[in-house]
Amino acid sequence: MINQLQEKYQLSLLLLLASVASLGIFPFVVMRYLAGNITAAIMDMMLILGISALVVHAYYFKKIRIVSAIIAFFINAGLLIVVIANGLDSFLWVYPVFASTFILVKPIEALAINIVASILLIALSDIFNSVSLTSYVVTITMLSMSTFVYASHSAKQFHLLEALNTIDPLTGALNRRAMSLDIKAALASSERNGIEQLLAILDLDYFKAVNDKYGHAAGDQVLKDFVTITTAHIRKYDRLYRFGGEEFVLLIPVTKEQQQPFIANLRATIKQELKTPDGEEITVSLGVAPWVAGTTVETWLQRADDALYLAKSKGRDRAVFNDE
């Protein structure tokens, strides 16, 4: 899958963090302005505007990972500047900023940023004339390690949830939910950049006979073997989805000159390697639809399905291309 779920999740975290930061910092902008501390008020306002601008950029241009890293650097650098400028009055901002860093970047990256920022804070500020250095080191270490453990656990849980939502539990291929999202993204990429792609529906020939002769457990193993063989002979950025039953869908970015050889080699490989429990070969029929301008999700799948119908009607164990 092209990370749509992760992008939405990270974007929602960015929006939440920006909202909380704005609501939390803005009262201090007003207070410091009224107290005559114009420099500090300007710094705080720049933090709000900077974070907001970066989140808007992430929303429109989908550069979420890059923007998150920039914001992490931005708020930590801003923290150092504000604490050095304001001293003890701004020291307590260290804790929410360090915790927020774990929301923005990977746990190990956030931990590294916290360590660097802590060292710079000790080296460049004079607040430890008033604050116990030992207490600071102990509390910031506890905060960083606790947040690191929590963020790491949350990341694992998210990846598990993503797998449950996008992976077919029987075969390990991607499921129809992932397929729908990926096809939409692929169409947008082709329309925008002219990237040549093909979509193929693969159907295992006479699969019902396999179930009838050997049982459903053996049939399930054949499906698993099919996915293992196919994924071993396609590239990492090609995608295989279980469409339903013994039908699968391939989504492949490949030039027109390479499309027919690619499909022919894949079909031959499956025929050679996919076997029934007693060693009989299992063949596949393919309906292949290269991308053409103006294609929609529905028309792309329909063209591939029409081609698959022709492949079956012509005797199976073949690939038919639909270039219309």
Image (tube, rainbow, N blue to C red):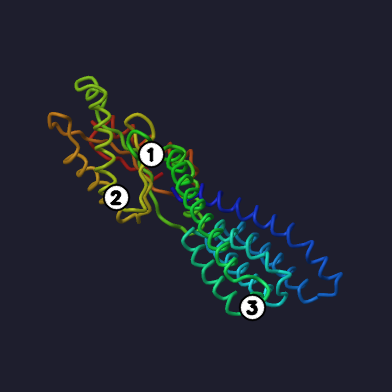
Q: Which residue is mark 1?
A: 304
Specify the farthest residue to the right.
Answer: 34
Q: Quadrant of the C terminus?
A: top left
Residue 283, position as x, y percentages in the image: 21, 35
Whether residue 137 is situated above or below residue 266 in the rendered picture: below
**How far apart, in angstroms, are the residues tagged by discs 3 and 2?**
56 Å
Q: Which residue is mark 2?
A: 234
- Residue lying at 63% horizontally and 65% vertically, measured from the top left: 94
* Badge nearest the viewer, 3 or 2: 3
Crowding at dot 1, Cα within 10 Å, few <14 / some 14-19 / many 20+, comes out as many
Residue 14: numbered disc? none
Please say if the residues under marks 1 and 2 sit with CB atoms less than 8 Å apart.
no
Q: Secondary structure at mark 2?
A: loop
Crowding at dot 3, Cα within 10 Å, few <14 / some 14-19 / many 20+, comes out as some
Please say if the residues under marks 1 and 3 sit with CB atoms less than 8 Å apart.
no
Whether residue 164 is situated above or below residue 125 in the rendered picture: above
Whether residue 254 is situated above or below residue 225 in the rendered picture: below
Q: Which residue is mark 3?
A: 125
Q: Is residue 106 left or right of residue 171?
A: right
* Badge nearest the viewer, 1 or 2: 2
Instruction: State whether residue 193 appears in this view.
Output: yes
**How far apart, in angstroms, are the residues tagged by discs 1 and 3?**
66 Å
Q: Is residue 181 left or right of residue 100?
A: left
Q: Amino acid at mark 1?
A: Ala
Please say if the residues under marks 3 and 2 sit with CB atoms less than 8 Å apart.
no
- Residue lying at 74% horizontally and 57% vertically, measured from the top left: 23
- Residue lying at 22% horizontally and 25% vertically, measured from the top left: 210
Given residues 187 and 295, the one toward you in this image is 187
Residue 310, position as x, y percentages in the image: 32, 33
Q: Secondary structure at mark 1?
A: helix
Given residues 88 and 229, the one toward you in this image is 88
Residue 63, position as x, y percentages in the image: 55, 61
